[in-house]
Image (cartoon, rainbow, N blue to C red):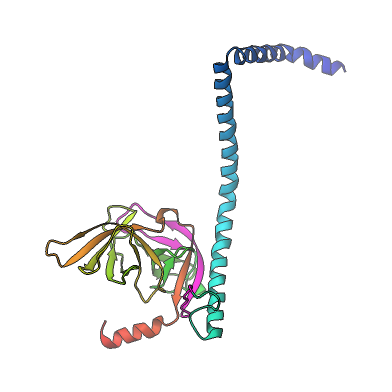
Amino acid sequence: MYRLIEFIKRIYVIVLFLLLEGVVLWNYAQSSPYTEAKILSRTTAVGGAISSAISSVEHFFSLPSMNRMLTERVAELNKEVERLSLAEGVGVVEGCDSVQYDPHFKYHPARVVSMTTSRQRNFVVLDRGFEDGITKDMGVVTPDNKLVGYVVSCSEHYSVVQPMLSVEFSTGGRLVDNGHVCVIRWSGESKYLVEAVELSVYSEPKEGMEVEVSSERLPSGVLIGKIVDFELNSAKSAYSAEIEIAADISRLDNVLIVENSHAKELEELKEVVGM
């Protein structure tokens, strides 16, 4: 009891000051409707900011594991679709007539280890390599089937991807609405836009028209983006168009590496004809 009294003696000035300060603030807050509203808005904003910060921290630490699980689940579902397709002997799963599936393609989940987006030749490093069945020229897409790029090099445990954001990148594209093909490349100017060139004068491009990949390295339906602008060249022989990239390359976390089981056969055929 004696110690408690001594402790109170030491801090009573501070306690009294805080108590009086609280009374003054309370009276000030009640002095007018404007003051009351002002203080209420400030305290609400501070409380909201603290709550938002705590929520963001919790979300930040849980998001990578959630994304990883979702990506692996997508790969598992693709394998299951493949199994069902082979069992039916067709590329369409029974009961899902709108979903076409090519059983020649297999999906490997991977995580982005590091990447660059501010250079003329950007690269993405993934945590999968030869040991995981990954080889050069495999396609890389997001879990929601948007193009990222292609594998250009592999080690035992890692692989390097050349994304669309590289001046050396090139792939085939196709207008979803009418099937006209084009060449997709990056000018190095904007990390949100790629170019479609060599579009036929009969392709009739329009703003908002979707463009998907046209390549033997990826199945049909992989989205590149949407046309935001287009023009006819001076010779009036072909269109070029600017395409807003569908995938947010700068925020990649988990991806799918796509393997074409017929890739070796295709390469041998190309060698025969000199492609």
Q: Quadrant of residue 139?
A: bottom left
**Quadrant containing the N terminus in the rendered view:** top right
Q: Quadrant of residue 202?
A: bottom left
> Farthest bottom residue?
272
Describe residue 112's horizontal placement relative to residue 269 as left or right.
right
Q: Residue at x 48, y 67 (%)?
A: 256
**Quadrant containing the C terminus in the rendered view:** bottom left
Expressed as whole percent of the image width and height from the top left, the position of residue 138 reads 41, 72
Expressed as whole percent of the image width and height from the top left, the position of residue 87 reads 56, 84
| Residue 174 among magenta residues | no
Q: Nearer the viewer, residue 115 or 27?
A: 27
Q: Nearer the viewer, residue 154 or 220?
A: 220
| Residue 118 among magenta residues | yes
Q: Residue at x 81, y 14 (%)?
A: 6
Describe residue 267's horizontal placement relative to residue 27 as left or right.
left
The region drawn magenta spans 98-126
Q: Quadrant of residue 274?
A: bottom left
